[in-house]
Image: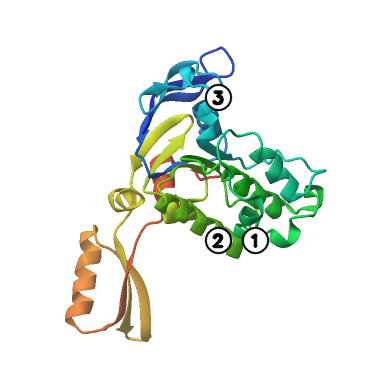
Amino acid sequence: MISVENLYHDYTGKEQYAVNDVSFNIKKGEVFGFLGPSGAGKSTTQNIMTGLLKLQKGEVLYESNSITKMKSEFYNNIGVSFEFHNLYTKLTGYENLKYFAGLFDVPTADPMELLDMVGLRADANKRVANYSKGMMQRIVFARSLINNPKILYLDEPTSGLDPTTASQIRQLIKRKKEEGCTIFLTTHNMFAADDLCDRVAFLNEGKIVAMDTPRNLKMKHGEKSVVVEFAGEKGIKKSVFFLDNEEDKKQLNKIILNKEVQTIHSQEATLEQTFIKLTGRGLI
């Protein structure tokens, strides 16, 4: 459905690329995660894909049609939720959604239903200036759904939210996927990415360094290990054994043969650990 081909972007004019030869495809109905630390090029890529930044080099195609040839109707089919809000703070939450609904040429969702969906019905008539950061984040997410979009661009949709509200937003994203929405998620929150994404791309210094399903990336690049509690000379001991290490395997087999095992649990690498292994840096 969406194809990004050999994308470059240079803010300096000195061939210092914020986005450097980036290519990927997104299937219809897929949640595609674009993951990396701040400054990696995530937002630049998203801004090019949504037409907010002019395409310099490369191509962005929507069902084989170039972003450079898209007309205003294109924006009737996409929803965008940025990490940093651009709301009218003197208007209420309800008035904001009502205003933005009026900008589209397609049937729109009921603003009050959207506010209810993100837990803001009780604050519908409160000025946005009096909203907390988390409330603003939720109304920006609600606004991205106002035109019933076929494609959603979500930039850190759970940033600044408490765990319960973040979980609710993730459930809403899953619901939109079930309804057939194609979702492009930019984030450095690896937990959210692991929970939501069908595939992810790791972006570092403007380049994609890996791309696959979260599970495949963790299985391919993570260290396979088990955590074992076993009976030792001085009571119960707990150790981690790496299954690719021959000495560890010998020790583990000995413990099992001697029937000393109390508990044993597999230990899977996290997506964040995998990112650090591949890039040599963290996500902050």
Residue 188 visible, this orientation: yes
Q: Earlier in the sequence, mark 2 or mark 1?
A: 1
Q: Is disc 2 in contact with disc 3, using a CB cutoff of under 8 Å?
A: no
The CA span between labels 1 and 3 is 31 Å
Q: Secondary structure at mark 2?
A: helix
Residue 271 visible, this orientation: no
Q: Earlier in the sequence, mark 1 or mark 3?
A: 3
- Residue 170 point in image, percent of width and height: 51, 56
Disc number for residue 119:
1
Q: Which of the 4 image quarters holds residue 144?
A: top right
Between residue 275 and residue 135, name the one nearer to us: 135
Mark 1: few/some/many CA within 10 Å (<14, 14-19, 20+): some
Q: Is residue 82 above or below residue 253?
A: above
The CA span between labels 2 and 3 is 32 Å
Q: Is residue 14 above or below residue 252?
A: above
Can you identify the residue that label 2 sits on?
168
Q: Residue at x 72, y 40 (%)?
A: 87
The CA span between labels 2 and 1 is 9 Å
Q: Residue at x 66, y 49 (%)?
A: 139
Q: Amino acid at mark 2?
A: Gln
Can you identify the residue that label 3 sits on?
72
- Please indicate whether residue 131 sits to the left or right of residue 49 in the image: right
Mark 2: few/some/many CA within 10 Å (<14, 14-19, 20+): some
- Residue 3 point in image, percent of width and height: 37, 29
Q: Earlier in the sequence, mark 2 or mark 3?
A: 3
Q: Is disc 2 in contact with disc 1, using a CB cutoff of under 8 Å?
A: yes
Q: Amino acid at mark 3?
A: Ser
- The quadrant in which the C terminus is found is top right
Mark 3: few/some/many CA within 10 Å (<14, 14-19, 20+): few
